[in-house]
Amino acid sequence: MARDTNGNYTLATGNPVASGTVISVNWANPTMADVAAALTDSLSRSGDGGMLVPFENQDGDVALPGITWALEPSTGLYREGNNDMQAGVAGARVTKWFNDTAATSGNQNPFQIWDGAAWRDVIRDNHFDPITFRGLVTMTGGVAISGAGTIDNTVIGATTPAAGRFTTFTSTGIDDNATSTAITIDASGNFALGQTLGTFTSPGTTIYGGGALNGVINATVNDGYVLALNRKLSVGDIQQFFYDNAKVGRIEVTGSATSYVTSSDPRLKSEFVGPVGALDKIVEARENGYIGVFNFLVEPNVPVLGYNAHALIDNQSGFGGSEGLGPRTLAIGDEYEPAEYETRPIMAARPTFNDEGVETGVELYDTGKTEEVVVVPAKTVEPAGVDQSKRVPLLEAAIYDLLKLNEALAARLDAAGL
């Protein structure tokens, strides 16, 4: 006969037999068939066949879990109570899963971890609550943090920073709101570290990755150097300069020297012609105040020998003067062309859900509000200048003129017998 609902097996009718009973097909064959059927319905220890209905286990407990291992019976899964399944390792509880659908959406905690004193939430309404990753963590397919999601006290490398947070904003980028100017990445890809975007007066660095200033790097310090370049192990260029993708200059370093090199390939130039009037230009500059001693207004007691850029530009074009931006009648920094603005809608992020109410991602939506965005920055007056390296060829030519004058004078003196 078959097993009962509790799994107990009872021998077929006619068993057991009394001593001296003659073997008869009437009771022997049905008995063997019944035993064969019962064995077939049993689970093989060797893994032959499989369960035909759900496998039911003993509840067990944290000391002896209902699902465990032959070599470690104190580790496994056990049923703690209604709708509550837990895992234990070496007789100690570690995690649990339970039905928390009755809780209000946003407050559900279907998975928890035991920290040695209490259960701690890990997943709340399809979101991860505070969790620590140790070692390498790889996430594929992207990571979305919506609503008020934050990453607190982030550890990068082996150093734990001071308490702070990075908060994600889908429409405005990333902003560390623990310190207003710690780090900001806006929606255009502009990156600011230590200063507010667009503010050059405070110390920090801004890299513009979008907008009208795309490609500009701004670095500001209160004192000390702004940029440190260090070439190791070999002699060569430490910085290169390009115009329209063509290299036009470089800075080369050795173990003890620095060379500033501008492009000067004769293949890029017309035929060379000896300069005329170099000495006259030197005299003109001296006699007309293109060069002289002056003081900067911010340092009235510090004499400086230098050039008047506007005078050089107006009277000796091409020999070192470089015009600034904007009218000369305005002060440096004054605005001479206003910024251009564009009205754009203010977008915000909100979660999306499928028909079952499960959150599936994030979408942007129009808040109905607008903001004025600078698309072309204002133009402000920038100072003129002098590239003093452009005066060096002029000085060399003037020296040559003086040598020729001296030679002619010496020849006349010799002819006069003096």
Image: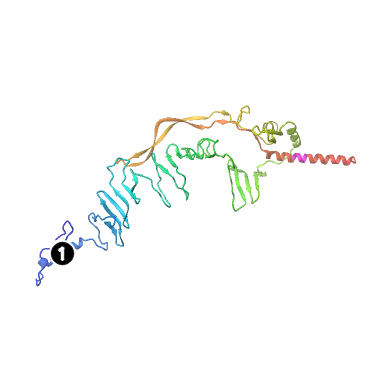
Q: Is residue 399 magenta?
A: yes
- Between residue 86 and residue 273, name the one nearer to us: 86
In magenta, the rendered stretch is 397-401
Query: In the rendering, at what x and y percent does residue 108 appear?
Result: 31, 43
Left or right, 214 with respect to 22, comes to right
Q: Is residue 306 magenta?
A: no
Quarter containing the C terminus: top right
Left or right, 327 with respect to 176, comes to right
Under mark 1, the amino acid is Ala
Query: In the rendering, at what x and y percent does residue 265 appear?
Result: 66, 44
Query: In the rendering, at what x and y percent does residue 246 appear?
Result: 59, 43
Q: Is residue 175 visible to the viewer in this orientation of the structure?
A: no
Find residue 400 and report its image quarter.
top right
- Between residue 196 and residue 380, name the one nearer to us: 196
Q: Is residue 336 visible to the viewer in this orientation of the structure?
A: yes
Left or right, 318 with respect to 374, comes to right
- Between residue 34 and residue 97, name the one nearer to us: 97
Q: Name the residue under label 1.
A: 33
User: Which secondary structure, mark 1?
Assistant: helix
